Amino acid sequence: MKILVGIPILNEIGNVEPLICELLALDIRISLFIVDDSPISSETKIMEREFPKERFFFRHRSKRMGVGSAHQEIILFGSSNHFDYVVTMDGDGTHSSRDIPKLLKAIQYSDLVIGSRFMNGGDLRDWTLSRRLSTKTAHVITKLATRTSLDCTSGIRAYNLKTTNYEKLLRKLPSDYRFFYSSTFRLLANNIKIRQVPVILESRNLGKSKMNLGLATKLILSLFFGSLGFVLKFRRN
């Protein structure tokens, strides 16, 4: 069983290094793929930690291309290199390595597993009120649109590459944060089997979130119209 954990980063060197150590210390043998949109490549500094080269892959992109684009690149890399499962997670310290075994256990019986902040056992720990409100609002919108409790905007996920051709299904999706709900809508429309496991998201360890009020408002509006489009096009009574 070949497992790839993919982590998009943007100026997250202080957060991603300890996360890599935690992931490589798991009892599960995994490989890592870092997609780095930072202005200056973080590869040299990360590799100074003597991580195992045969299990570590790195791609520095010359400009900021978007978190959704990074997730698509991770999935494509996993498929092209014959991995069985791909797990995606953030490198800012909010996603925990402790959740990886849960995702991998669940993906044995599904096509996609989403780490949910809203099911029993999930939480947004020590998040600011504004971020809690925007995240909860997004969840309510997608819940109404899909008639499911799926956490459609969550970025911690496991993909079963043995059962599903994600390269084809995830083609031409938004390159930014819209990727998460857009991909979920498309997968639901194609009857992909999706499960959830509870995850607890911590507040950031270091640095400042890329999400601000203006961007959050823009994404909520985009999500509303995207959800409306999904309802009109795909959902049947």
Image (cartoon, rainbow, N blue to C red):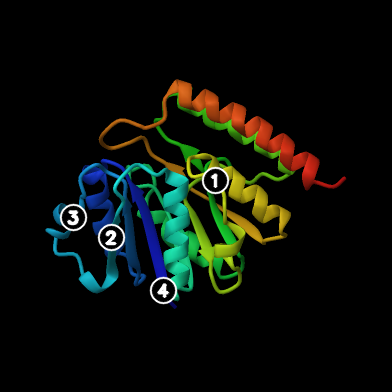
Looking at marks 3 and 1 on the same chain, the residue that comes earlier in the sequence is marked by 3
**Residue 109, located in which quarter of the rendered image?**
bottom right
Q: Nearer the viewer, mark 1 or mark 4?
A: 4
- Residue 101, how many percent across, how many down? 44, 63
Q: Is 194 left or right of 52, judged from the image as shown? A: right
| In this picture, residue 122 sits left or right of residue 55 | right
Residue holding disc 4: 81
Residue with the most extreme left position = 48
**Eyeballing the image, is 46 above or below 82?**
above
- Horizontal side of 72 relative to 56 (left or right) equals right
Q: Amino acid at mark 2?
A: Phe
Report the amino acid beneath label 4: Asn
User: Looking at the image, is mark 2 or mark 1 nearer the viewer?
Assistant: 2
Could you tell me the amino acid type at mark 3? Answer: Ile
Q: Nearer the viewer, residue 60 or 7?
A: 60
Instruction: Say few, some or many: other residues with alpha carbon within 10 Å of mark 4 (under 14 / 14 to 19 / 20 or more).
Output: few
| The quadrant where residue 152 appears | top right
User: At x 24% / y 42%, what residue is drawn?
Assistant: 39
Q: How far apart, in angstroms, are the residues tagged by discs 2 and 1?
A: 22 Å
User: Which label belongs to residue 58?
Assistant: 2
**Contact? badges 2 and 3 (CB < 8 Å):** yes
Residue drawn at (51%, 43%) of the image? 122
